[in-house]
Amino acid sequence: MTESNQPEKVFKTEEMVLNMGPQHPSTHGVLRFELTTDGEVMTKAVPDIGYLHRGIEKLAETVGYVGFMPYTDRIDYVSAMTANQGYAMAVEKLAGIEVTRRAELLRCTASELNRISSHLVGVGSFGLDMGASTPFVHALRERETINDLLESLCGARLTYNYVRIGGVSHDLPTGFIDKAMVFLNHFEPIVGELNRLLSDNKIFIERLANIGVISKEDAINYGLVGPNLRGSGVKFDVRRDEPYSVYPELDFNIPVGLGKAGTLGDCFDRYYVRVEEMRESAKIVRQCLLKLKDLPEGDIMGKVPRKIKPPKGEVLVKVESSRGEMAYWIVSDGSDNPLRLHCRTGSFTSMGIIEKLSRGMMIADLVALIGSFDIVAPEVDR
Amino acid sequence: MRERHPRSVNFEIPRYILFMTYFSNIKTAVSTVFEGMTITFSHLLREPMTIQYPDRTPLPVKDTLPPRYRGFLCVRPEICTACTLCQKTCPIDCIVIEHSKDEELKQRVMTRFDIDMAKCMFCGLCTEQCSTGAIYFTNEFEASTSNIKDLVFKFIKQGEKVIPYKIPRKKKPAAAAAETQAAAKEKKE
Amino acid sequence: MQPFIDQIISECEILQGLPLWFSYLIFQLIFCGIIFVFVAVFAMLAGYAERRVAGRIQSRIGPNRVGPQGILQSLADGIKVFLKEDIIPTHADHILFRLAPYFIFIGMFLSFVAIPFSSQWVIADLDIGIFYLLAVESLVVIGIVMSGWASNNKWSLLGGMRSAAQIVSYEVPVALTILLVVMYSGTMSIQGIIMAQGAAPWNWNIFQTPFLFVAFFPLFMGSLAEGNRMPFDMPEAESELVSGYNTEYSGFRFVIFFFAEFSNLYLIGALATVLFFGGWQAGPLPDFVNGLLGIETPLSAAIVKNLVELCVFMFKSLCLVFIVIQLRWTLPRVRVDQLMNICWKYLVPVAFFNLVVMGIWMVVVPEYVTDIVALCMTACGVLLLGYFFYRVAWQLKNTKARLRFNPLS
């Protein structure tokens, strides 16, 4: 022992264990983190999940194929449309049901609008986590218009239950295309304003740059998906790489993290990917609406048997949800209930890497990290 | 020994670059804060978006909802065929229909049609199954009550017997609709 | 204050019969009561105004139901909080827990003693007034650390510790900047600092030289940090520490924290006004108003003069308060280590640099050059303000926003 180590022996310090959550404003729902801190600096943060477990996957085994559709809304209530779509696609693949083109376009329009609204919540609440409360309210203000649009389309503002096995529940209401176009025209400058207010802000950038850096390899190894994966510079998007629905005919870019503020794969990159994705989604909605305008009126439901009884087998279908790749795995035993249903969600996979990244972070950085993953607690637990 | 803070790793950066970043930091900080201030100030001059629910809206909110809005469920028992498809399709079993063969009337009657709105998740699967449109969504949504039992909507009163509606076969749709309307009118009176 | 009381006594025959010390005591107590009421009312109204401003910034309306346009909202909230159960956690340090709010409140309230609201209306015009202000405001940090420690809550403790580090650090740039102003004015008396400036903008300290202009920012940011206002509200940090040091407080003790926060909001504005914006200096305005009203008796003339100066002072300080409020709703929060970086790597060097250069400037540069520079600086200030409003107009045009200028709806 050298002399310099003496003070540490005399003033013995302990690490402090802190409970962050289950009720905490920046854990985005009922989620708990056990922090081991040395003053402000953490040595470890362990996510403790399961506070919102509702057994949705088990419920699927009793409510039947059609009856499970409303439950998919509740898996990820911020982006319910993509969850709907993924489940419907899985059952369609299992039972061999064809979907009409009009229904596909409607699904695409609705889920891209939903993606915008979900990213608005993500971006806005991320600002709130960083202490800027105004961008959050501005983002929610824009989301309100999307909610109105989707409400006129399917009758609900949050748990849409719009997609049906074999199609969708409603066709476009009158005036929807014009209203949506007005919104998109209004929305694009608003994203610019949001950038000027929040993303360009020096304090905001300083809070996020070089925090929670995830390398490409780590992002893939830990199974990150969606914007979290793309934030690390991996150009992977289910919509482009394993295309489904009408995405192959649409023209859109896949924004990836560029290390604009600091290192590639830091919190700012993940945040900025979401901002860029909102613009891309607006582009997609515009194209879909134009296609819908040209398309003659037609069936919105394909030929669906009265009782859906898929043949024995299993299927894995992936969609790009707002929080990343969302996979449904359904095993059928030939009866009218699935034997087993599992969904793999973006928020859940991002919980794994938190413990690794949290070492040496400050408490405020953990808030930034959780916010940058855009975690929705019910999606973690299901 | 305590581990070093990962961020405190020192890179060898030339002095003059540090000096320049010092001032560029100040410059960007000042200019972005200024820009943010102009945006927030401009919002002071913009129209607020608030809808002052419930009392200071130009129209009652109920009337501004789109026609597809999924509010409370409502049932017209007079055109209900007692097929119980809605009951079967409901994923959470919040609809209870009781029907039995009545000895006096010598036919099937419905004695109970309850919907537990406290359980209902407004998914709309029941309304899609209904062939006559007897079960439908209204624009009502204000559900707060001091007793949760108030949320069990009884569409057939205790002791009342409702003869299920029979869809007339091989009739033109217009005639069927007229009959439906007549039935509804009769019920009202 | 003394000349004003003397004037009243000389006018009023009843008071002449009383011993002089007694009438002084009475008047000082009355003025203290007025200040106390002012602090309370200001805290209430500032709470309301902040919520209304925040509302409009966020495309909302804000509270508008209690009383006309919701002006009594803070009162209603206060009553609600009073009626709450007063909880002291079982394992809290009871004595410190009860004591902490008073430290905070005393620290805030004692500062008001030295704030000059007009040329004669100041409770105590101390010769070392600005030094007194600095000293007294530091009492607040003791209260915050106390409350954080006594709550027996880890999050509160973190809040208390953050605040201790923050307030103690930010005293340094604030003190250095105040030293600069003291050096420029040649006095430590607050009234003296105001007298050394003038009513016109080019006579204000802020526009005297570029260095004084730059020096304003360390002071302003420092007092924001000391008052735990937004970009530096580490101790409260809603999204990190939930509510920080006052998490465990409820009922009346919580109200005291609330009062302290908002009276400190006014102190931020008042301090900057005194040091940089010419305080209550109203120039020929009081004489003009007196002439307009046709007032002749010296006492009422003095009252009118003081009132006009009070209005000027209030206007200036409330403008700054508005900026503080707007900043809160614009900026994200800095991290706790960045907070220290800003203080020690940016504000302190800038303050030191200003101090040294200003000292040289005062020795070397002749007075007429300073006058010309002051005029140029004022012009620059006006241009900056103009550019601000140009950008505001551009923002509105860029997003094709629908406008509503009525501030109340």
Image: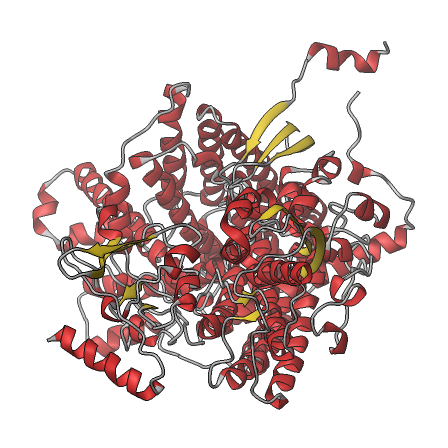
Location of residue C175 (image quadrant): top right
The percent position of residue A6, horizontal first and vertical second, equals 78, 11
Tell me if I can see residue C208 in this picture.
no
Location of residue A358 (image quadrant): top right
The percent position of residue C144, horizontal first and vertical second, equals 47, 33
**Is A180 on the left-hand or right-hand side of C365?**
left
Instruction: Indicate the colouring scheme.
Output: secondary structure
Q: Nearer the viewer, residue B121 or A156?
A: B121
Tell me if I can see residue A283 in this picture.
yes
Write the residue at 62% across / 30% down: A35
**Is A297 on the left-hand or right-hand side of C316?**
right
Instruction: Tell me the quarter of the image containing the N terminus of chain A.
Output: top right
Write the residue at 70% across / 57% down: A317
Location of residue C49 (image quadrant): bottom left
**Is B100 on the left-hand or right-hand side of B29?**
left
Q: Is residue C371 above or below residue A84?
A: below
Instruction: Tell me the quarter of the image containing the C terminus of chain A.
Output: top right
Q: Is residue C292 above or below residue C225?
A: below
Write the residue at 28% across / 77% down: B58
The percent position of residue B126, horizontal first and vertical second, equals 40, 62
Q: Nearer the viewer, residue B150 or B99?
A: B99
The percent position of residue A110, horizontal first and vertical second, equals 57, 71
Q: How many numbered circles does the render carry?
A: 0
